[in-house]
Amino acid sequence: AQRVTQPEKLLSVFKGAPVELKCNYSYSGSPELFWYVQYSRQRLQLLLRHISRESIKGFTADLNKGETSFHLKKPFAQEEDSAMYYCALLYNFNKFYFGSGTKLNVKP
Amino acid sequence: DAGVIQSPRHEVTEMGQEVTLRCKPISGHDYLFWYRQTMMRGLELLIYFNNNVPIDDSGMPEDRFSAKMPNASFSTLKIQPSEPRDSAVYFCASTPNFGNPGTDTQYFGPGTRLTVL
């Protein structure tokens, strides 16, 4: 069963435009969600976790249990945001799934 | 700190050959994960260890895949025999706090790009 769905493989936006990377999950309990990012020629790394309710590099993500979503948003995209983004789900404290990833391309 | 170390960085082999990928986790991290990344399926968790013991190997695709962690500083992922569909990037990751959503952060290695001809 697909537990984390990222419907867009590629998302292209212009610099300064708002960006939203979609993530939907399948889990009826209390999920813990994360966004990981992989910049070109760098290692995959944690961007943010929903439990912290933090904004990192201008990105935020809100957990919507009604829609089972955890979309990643940024009001004004920058070229350096171009990267591969993965949504991830942790449940039962020991089950961890990544989505298939979305490649964000921010055009100048 | 060099972080998680993986070797080799690139591996090209012929179908039927045995392939061994290696990983050295960050010192003090009790959890080690092996992932496979492909264009079609994204990032898949293959297996993870806690204190050198395999905990969940439900993601291992076939019996051709095996993983070991003989000690806290070394793990291997072996494919025998290899097939062209095994071509992918294989990542190793480690963390000291798996399952704690407030602190769980997986630290990834640079990956091994495997090509099976």
Image (spheres, coloured by chain):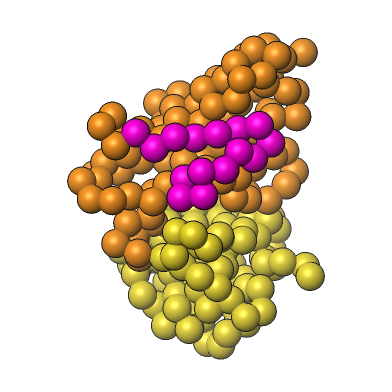
Chain colours: A orange, B yellow
Percent from the top left, x then y, of residue B33? Answer: 49, 66
Q: Residue at x 46, y 50 (%)?
A: A51
Percent from the top left, x then y, of residue A94? Answer: 35, 65
Q: Would residue A70 appear left or right of B17 to someone viewing this image?
A: left
Residue B40 position (above or below residue B109): above
Q: Residue at x 67, y 67 (%)?
A: B4
Residue B1 position (above or below residue A3): below
Q: Residue at x 75, y 29 (%)?
A: A80
Q: Nearer the viewer, residue A76 or A26?
A: A76
Which image quadrant is residue A68 in?
top left
Name the dominant secondary structure of the magenta segment: loop
Range covered by the magenta-colored residues: A49-64
Percent from the top left, x then y, of residue A86? Answer: 51, 40
Q: Is residue A45 visible?
A: yes
Q: Nearer the viewer, residue B85 or B94?
A: B94
Quadrant of the drawing holding the N terminus of chain B: bottom right
Q: Residue at x 50, y 26 (%)?
A: A21
